[in-house]
Amino acid sequence: MLYYLFTYLDQHFDFPGAGVFQYLSFRAGAAITLSLMIAAVYGRQIIDMLRNLQIGEEIRDLGLEGQMQKRGTPTMGGFIILASLVFPTLLFAKLTNVYIVLLLVSTVWTGLIGFIDDYIKVFRKNKEGLQGKFKVVGQVGLGLIVGLTLYFNEHVKIRVYKPGLINTSIGQVENGAFQDIKSMSTTVPFLKNNDFNYNALIPDFIPDEYTWILYVAIVIFIITAVSNGANITDGIDGLAAGTSVIIGLTLGVFAYLSNNKLFSQYLNIMYIPNSGEMVIFCAAFVGACVGFLWYNSYPAQVFMGDTGSLMLGSIIAVLALATRKELLIPIMCGIFLVELVSVIMQVSYFRYTKRRFGEGRRIFLMSPLHHHFQKKGYHEAKIVTRFWIVGIILAVICLVTLKLR
């Protein structure tokens, strides 16, 4: 909103300093500063409110060291992230930008799903929370909105260079020009000619206009997988929030480079018009997560709950899809992936061995993976720090793909 206000003041009244709102760097800096301030200043008030409402975590005894000491810690702290993210975005981003609208919808949508889950756990005293099938329905609904918008919206385009374009008015061949086109291309890491079109996955006997069905299905899968991965990762103090900060910074870099003509040409990456606004959102996202970490780092004063964890995962998935970097998700979100796979492996192997041998066996001491290391005697602060280090390494690998092909 401030962007439109100061743009108007600059154009009509030549208001001193109003022109700085045209710069992404200024608005991103303002967004991250404001999100940090909101989380730091109002986070304590939100925690006190949650405590007064007796919104505390019911801890199930899993035999982990220090676990029962966390009983009664306020949950639903995802509201701190939600407020710290949405408010700066509304102030500093272009609200007509299709990517910003999608990200705000994703934030509120999965935040609401997580809130319902936490509400059932806390107030209905049902530890299982919202049934899994209803969570999946909500995630599929978001996937449909995101997939259909990215595929059909006329403002979602890529800019390509067309050499030797013909000027139809005079029949003259020009050196070339840039054109904005609708394309379902994405970026394949580690390859020199790294654009891949989803049309290639459709058999020849099926018309290309049906590609949207496949694309939407892929979007649904990505959003569901990443949001559930983030949800499972949120098991010890600071792990999900800190990992999300690293991923958010990486996606912010991709969004900025994809909207910069010089950098996109130099790095030979896809130019995505209007994607620069996502830098504002990424800045607010990082600021909100860092501000939340002030209270969520060990020993946690508040838990984000599903209100926060499902929201973080969906935001990351939508950012990756919008920047055409979804094929980097297994690397970029490697922590989420390993945590999710560890649960799938544990449950599948336990059921298989119980069916075959009459007794369930386990691969890990406990899943998700961070609990396995807790069972081995590692302090959770050490586990979190080392997972962060792995996350940073994975982020660096993702950024290296810009040049290493």
Image: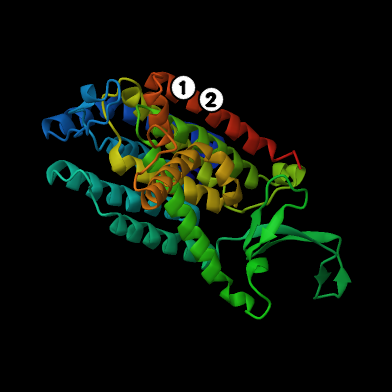
Question: Is residue 30 at least partly visible in the picture?
Answer: no
Give the structural element (helix, strand or loop) at label 2: helix
Q: Position of residue 160 (x, y in %)?
A: 72, 58
Report the disc number at residue 42.
none
Q: Residue reaching furthest front?
A: 357
Question: Is residue 243 at least partly visible in the picture?
Answer: yes
Q: Indicate whether 356 appears above or below 182.
A: above
Locate the C terminus by quadrant: top right
Left or right: 241, with 273 as reference point: left
- Tell me the amino acid under the disc marked 2: Ile
**Res. 212 image quadrant:** bottom right
Question: Which residue position is annotated with label 2?
Answer: 389
What residue lies at 36% left-to-right and 41% top-to-bottom? 309
Left or right: 319, with 266 as reference point: left
What residue lies at 54% left-to-right and 48% top-to-bottom? 320
Marks 1 and 2 in Cβ contact (< 8 Å): yes
Q: Position of residue 356 (x, y in %)?
A: 40, 51
Q: Nearer the viewer, residue 29 or 241?
A: 241
Q: Position of residue 124 (x, y in %)?
A: 13, 46
What residue lies at 24% left-to-right and 52% top-to-bottom? 130
- Tell me the amino acid under the disc marked 1: Thr
